[in-house]
Structure formats: C-alpha cells, structure tokens
Image (spheres, grey):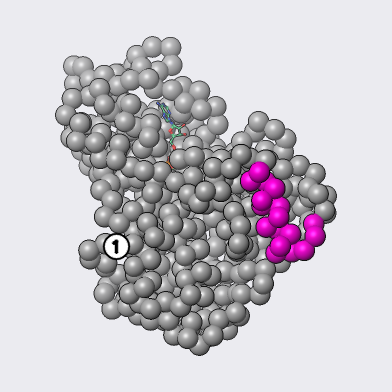
Amino acid sequence: MKPEIAVIGGGYAGLACAVALARSERVRATVFESGRVLGGRARVVTRQEPPVDNGQHILIGAYTQLLQTMRQVGVSPKVLESLPLTIAYADGFALRAARLPSPLHLAVGLARARGIDWADRFAAARLIRHLRHHDWQIAPDRSVTNLLIDTAQTATLRARLWEPLCVAALNTPAAEASAQVFANVLRDSLAAGSAASELLIPRVDLSELFPVPATRWLGRRGHSVRTSDPIRAIRIEDGAFWLDGGPSWAGYNQVVVATAPHHAGALLAPLPGLSSLCGTISAFDYQPITTVYLQFDRPPDIGPPMLGLSDGPAQWLFDRGCLGGPDGLLAAVVSARSGFDELPHRELELAVQRQLEQAFGRLPSPIWVRTIAEKRATFSCRPGLDRPDNLTPVPGLWLAGDYTRGPYPATLEGAVRSGLAAARGILASL
Ligand SMILES: Cc1cc2nc3c(=O)[nH]c(=O)nc-3n(C[C@H](O)[C@H](O)[C@H](O)COP(=O)(O)OP(=O)(O)OC[C@H]3O[C@@H](n4cnc5c(N)ncnc54)[C@H](O)[C@@H]3O)c2cc1C
C-alpha cells in the first residue's frame, strides 16, 4: 500500500504539491478544496455571465517552476500571451525591454525609453549596479522607499517605474515593502534577461490555466481532488492524521496544509506544539487587490494590452479583448491599501471611469461594470518578515502556500515553489 497524503487546499500551491507527489509514483494524494471552484486566490468567478477571474493576474518568464509544472500536466504554452516587459502610460511614457541578452535588453530599453531623460537613465543603471555590487543582498532589510532614496532615484523613475513595479510585484506600497524581496524580484526578472522579464498574460481563465488541467492529470493517475469538501479539523491519533471532512473522518500518513495563511491558523491551533508557528502566521498583515471590469460596446483604443495608470485608484489597465477575453472588456486593477479600496464599489467604479476618461478622453458608458474585491489578496511583504518553513514541528505535517519562507512575494510562482518544496520534503521523509 502506498502512503496516503492529504493536501488541504486546491490553490496553486496545493495542486503543484499533489502533482509532484503523483509524479513520484510513491504515494497516493488526495486534495481537499473547500470551494466549488479550484484555484483559490487565482480562480474563475462564474456567478454571472460572462465568467471573469477573481483578479487580473500576470506571470513573468522567471516563473520557471509554475511554467514547468503547467507543462508537466499538459498545458499548452499558447494559453499565455507573451510580451516583452513594457511599462507604458497613456501620456507617452514607455520603457520596453529589448529582445536582447542581459544586460543589453535593459540598457537598450532604457536608452530608447520615452518620457525619461538622461538623469533618469543613469539613476536606473545606478540602482541595478548597486544591487549587483551587493550581490542582490540588502542587509539589514529596509523599505523599498529607503532603497530608492539611498540610490538617489529621480522623482520620475520613482513615480513611473520603481513604485508601480513594487506595488505590482509585492502588492505592498514602497514605503512599507521589503527592499530585499524587491531586489530578489528584480534580480530574477528585469536583470536576468529578456526571456525572464517577459510578461506572460493568461488567455484562459485562472482555473483553466493550471488547476483544472492539474486535476484531470491527477485523476487519470488515480489521485483525487475533492471540491466543496472543507476540512474542519485535523486530529493526530495512533501515528496517523485524521481529517474531519467529507462524510466522515479519514486517516492519512502525512498532511499538507496548503491554505492561505489566514485559514491555516484555525486548522493548526488545536494541534500540540504549534503555538510559536501559529504566532508567526497570525502576525501576518494583508493587502487587498480590487479588479474593476468594464465591458464596452466597442473596444476603446488603449494601445498596448497592459497600460500603467496614474492619478486615480487603478494602477494598471488590461485590454482583455486582446487577451482571449470578449472584445471591449477592460480590467482596471487597484492594488494594495490606498484608501480607494475602502470605497463602496459604485463609487470606486465611477472613480475608475473618471480616471480612464482623464487618460483616454471621453468614453461611451460601459454596458456593464463588475467589481471583485479580494480583501486579503496577499500578505504585506514587509522588511524582515518572518515566514514559516514548509516543515512544521509536528512530523508529517507540512505547510505549502505563497507565504512560506522563500525569495518571492505572494505570487503564483511562490505558491508553486512552496508546494513543490513540501512534496520534496514528504518524499525525502519516506
Ligand atoms: C486579485 C489578485 C491578484 C493577484 N495578482 C497576481 C499576479 O498578477 N501575479 C501573481 O503571481 N500572483 C498574483 N496574486 C497572488 C496569487 O494569486 C497567490 O499568491 C496564489 O494564488 C496563492 O496560492 P496558494 O495556493 O498559496 O493559496 P490559495 O490560492 O489561497 O489557495 C488555498 C486554497 O485552500 C482552500 N481552503 C482554505 N481552507 C480550507 C479548508 N479548511 N479545507 C479545504 N480547503 C481549504 C481555499 O479555498 C483555497 O482554494 C494575486 C492575488 C489576488 C487575490
């Protein structure tokens, strides 16, 4: 009999973990997902027609583990629209990495950038040189704002490049965000070469991108993924883990808690020896992401499929019509705590529409507008944040999720890496 492994949570971390376990052919994996839809914080929302994602997501070429795991379960690379890293605004500011080897891709991109002068170009090069010189280590960790001040970044670069990139990658305002994690992201993307910094935008919904194909792949190999099956409690008895889910309690040899951090505490707290771990997890603070979808009759011409926005609630605008979605569908993303996320949806929607009119001139009224708010989209990626390991003090009990110790902020890649690390730990323990 193969050891039975339970994975609690059918998000990207839990499913990546189950796929890695299944690939070993040494264990049988069962994934329990409380929701009806797989994907967790990266899922399709089907309440109304047409279905939309719970939030616009972007991947980058540096997401090597996610991309590899997607390939392993048979996902075609065509599901991703690949674009050179481009930071562009409606007023003409544009920085596009050249399709050249590193560091030329960035040097040429900076030389050709529109809306910046030579002082800005030298400042950008100074920041990258500073980070390279210190081997991408920031010790002690400090805020991104402090890093930008220390390396004398210009007001234009701060407002148009570094601060928006920080919010896009860490979902934490620069003044509160970890310079070390920001440096890790820059090292593995912007500074790593044009392929790593390429933007990969899903052309299918986020559940179809990986969770659904992973589930089919697992099913064909005799592993199970059970949706609408919340685990209410974990009990340890006679050397086995007993899970309260489905119709009754069932026993497993090892368990991976692959929920978001704010759901992990309730499952872990009753178990002995985990009070310090629960303290670490409960110290996390969270940041919201709200996506305002606007469906227009005819697509307004916003230029590139992803555009930066300033002077208003949203930081980024996506033309879903160019990205496999219905023609005329725009997604405006309001990231991190800014005060705007506290507005009632109707007020936020009007503020976003005003912001779009400022950028593009008069627009027709949208046919419909829909807002999806994720109040705890990601953990606040603060300097020196203590993140837990995959291995817990209870032998056989593991954590997986975007919040466990690792180089990245809360991202799909961080979640997948964590799931794969938990699977490696389990397999090594057998
Ligand atoms: C709006 C938004 C935009 C984002 N944009 C990006 C982006 O552009 N790029 C990027 O890389 N990342 C982005 N992220 C972050 C990314 O979505 C997350 O980092 C990633 O999805 C986390 O995956 P996870 O598996 O760790 O956790 P989750 O996705 O939270 O998965 C945990 C799962 O556990 C389930 N669960 C919880 N409790 C139980 C229980 N008791 N029993 C059974 N199941 C349970 C939940 O239902 C959930 O499905 C964004 C997130 C949001 C919300």
> At which x and y percent is residue 195?
49, 69
The reply, left or right, for residue 197 in relation to residue 132 is: right
Residue occupying image coordinates x 58% and y 43%: 343
Whether label 1 lies within 8 Å of ligand 1 gets the answer no
- Asked which quadrant contains residue 205, the reply is top right
Which span is picked out in magenta? Answer: 347-363
Q: Main secondary structure of the magenta part?
A: helix
Vertical side of 286 occupied by 308: above or below:
below
Whole-percent x, y for residue 386 in the image = 25, 48
- Amino acid type at mark 1: Arg
Residue 267 is left or right of residue 209, and the answer is left
Q: Nearer the viewer, residue 233 or 26?
A: 233
Q: Residues within 10 Å of mark 1 (few under 14, many from 20)?
A: some
Q: Is residue 32 visible?
A: yes
Quadrant holding the C terminus: top left
What residue is at 33 percent from the left and 26 percent from the top?
Answer: 266
Relative to residue 19, is residue 319 depicted above or below?
Answer: below
> Which one is in front, 109 or 312?
312
| Left or right: residue 422 compared with residue 173 | left
Q: Is residue 268 above or below residue 343?
A: above
Q: Secondary structure at mark 1?
A: loop
Residue visible at 26% across and 55% down?
384
Quadrant of the image containing the N terminus: top left
Is residue 325 visible in this depiction of the protein? no
Provide residue 262's location: percent of width, then percent of height.
37, 35
322 within the magenta span: no
Residue located 47% across and 71% down the image: 158
Give coordinates of residue 252: x percent, y percent: 29, 23
Compared to 247, does 204 lie above or below? below
Q: Which residue is mark 1?
A: 142
